[in-house]
Image: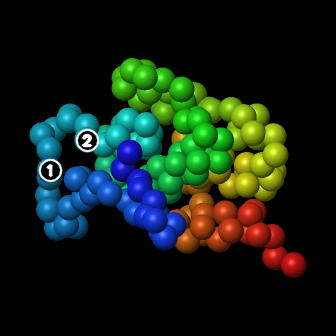
Amino acid sequence: ENIMVTDSGLVKIMDFGLARAHDTHTITATATMLGTPGYMPPEQIQSQGPGPLGDQYALGILAYEIMTRMHPFQEDDPLKMIFKHLSEVPPPPTERRADLPVELNEVIMKMIEKTPEKRYPDVQAANAAFQNAIWPPE
């Protein structure tokens, strides 16, 4: 609901409600969690704060959802959803859509690793891997 596609096919992210300047000290009280539970990385849930590797996790969840037409963690209850982000490894995308390239499956699963250090070093590396999985170099 926060991602829209224009008539020309351009994808736009609509909700920047949590965006803030880097020099802002806080936007919430201690122990208050902000974010969308369906896309929140485990490290943010565990109060380590948002960061680029967390953005990669959220992007990986979105890619999983786009490719399979299903969220990796099927859950309506926000607290149960948060628990799943912390403790469950979702089924690989190819289990939900067998026609996906294995390479794409591997990229998405790496982007949504529970441990940030096991993800790509940055979003640019994840993007390059994603593109290579979809359009392999010749």
The amino acid at mark 1 is Ile
Residue 79, relative to residue 12: is it above or below? above
How crowded pointer 2 is (Cα within 10 Å; few <14, some 14-19, many 20+) is rated as: some
Q: Secondary structure at mark 2?
A: loop
The amino acid at mark 2 is Leu
Residue 63, relative to residue 91: is it above or below? below
- For the question of whether residue 57 can be seen, the reply is no
Q: Which residue in the structure is indicated by mark 2?
A: 34
Q: What residue sits 32% from the left and 57% below the top?
A: 14
Q: Secondary structure at mark 1?
A: loop
42 to the left or right of 69: left
| Callout 2 touching callout 1 (CB < 8 Å) | yes
135 or 121: nearer the viewer: 135
53 or 69: nearer the viewer: 69
Which disc is residue 27 wearing? 1
Residue 63, relative to residue 34: is it above or below? below
- For the question of whether residue 11 can be seen, the reply is yes
Farthest-out residue, bottom: 138
- What is the quadrant of residue 114 in the picture? top right
Farthest-out residue, front: 7
Q: What residue sits 41% from the left and 54% below the top?
A: 3
Distance from disc 2 to disc 1, alpha carbons, whole Å, reads 9 Å
- What is the quadrant of residue 93 in the picture? top right
The C terminus - image quarter: bottom right
Q: What residue sits 62% from the left and 32% below the top?
A: 89
Q: Residue 90: percent from the left, percent from the top?
A: 63, 32
Q: Residue 49: percent from the left, percent from the top?
A: 31, 49
Q: What residue sits 73% from the left and 49% below the top?
A: 105
